[in-house]
Image (tube, rainbow, N blue to C red):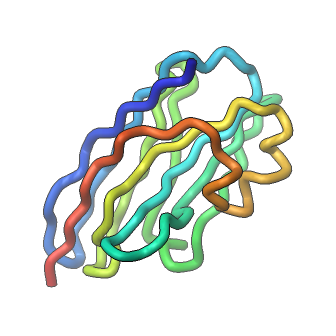
């Protein structure tokens, strides 16, 4: 059973930076996908950044709203996912969730950034950006 625990959220002023971490356990597949999603108050959960791990490659995908400001990376040994968030804006305020999918075919779906492409979820960490 995959378990995901996020950390690193907090409050920051616009223009600042935060780094989120997601510690994963229970992932035994050699090919899998992970990602960051967020849900602002009153809005639907949306994809922020995703990454595929398999055959020595780690392609990534980003939402247009964060492209160039956020960077997703992972430590395969530690099974830890990161999201470096720079130049934060008030509209980035949301609960941020880590997600994982161990279906090998996720290679074909992770770029869609769709919530339903991922089956395991963490509890979330709050990010608040003030103007």
Measuring 47% from the left and 25% from the top, which residue is drawn there? 3
Q: Where is residue 17 in the image (x, y as percent from the top left)?
A: 26, 62
Q: Is residue 97 left or right of residue 19?
A: right
In the image, residue 62 above or below residue 37 = below
Measuring 53% from the left and 66% from the top, which residue is drawn there? 46
In the image, residue 68 above or below residue 27 = below
User: Outermost residue toward the front?
Assistant: 42
In the image, residue 16 above or below residue 71 = below
Q: Is residue 42 left or right of residue 118?
A: left
Viewer can see residue 15: yes
Q: Position of residue 82 (x, y in %)?
A: 43, 43
Measuring 14% from the left and 73% from the top, which residue is drawn there? 13
Q: Where is residue 4 in the image (x, y as percent from the top left)?
A: 44, 31
Measuring 37% from the left and 32% from the top, which residue is drawn there? 5
Q: How many tags in the picture?
A: 0
Name the quarter where the C terminus is drawn: bottom left
């Amino acid at each position: 059973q995959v378990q995901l625990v996020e950390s690193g959220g907090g409050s920051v002023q616009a223009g600042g930076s935060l780094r989120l971490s997601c510690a994963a356990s229970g992932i035994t597949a050699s090919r899998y996908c992970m990602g960051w999603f967020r849900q602002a108050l009153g809005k639907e959960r949306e994809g922020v950044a995703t990454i595929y791990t398999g055959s020595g490659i780690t392609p990534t995908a980003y939402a247009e709203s964060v492209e160039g400001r956020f960077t997703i990376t992972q430590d395969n040994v530690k099974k830890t996912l990161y999201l470096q968030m720079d130049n934060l804006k008030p509209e980035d305020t949301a609960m941020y969730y880590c997600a994982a999918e161990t279906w090998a075919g996720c290679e074909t779906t992770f770029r869609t950034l769709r919530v339903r492409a991922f089956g395991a979820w963490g509890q979330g960490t709050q990010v608040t950006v003030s103007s």
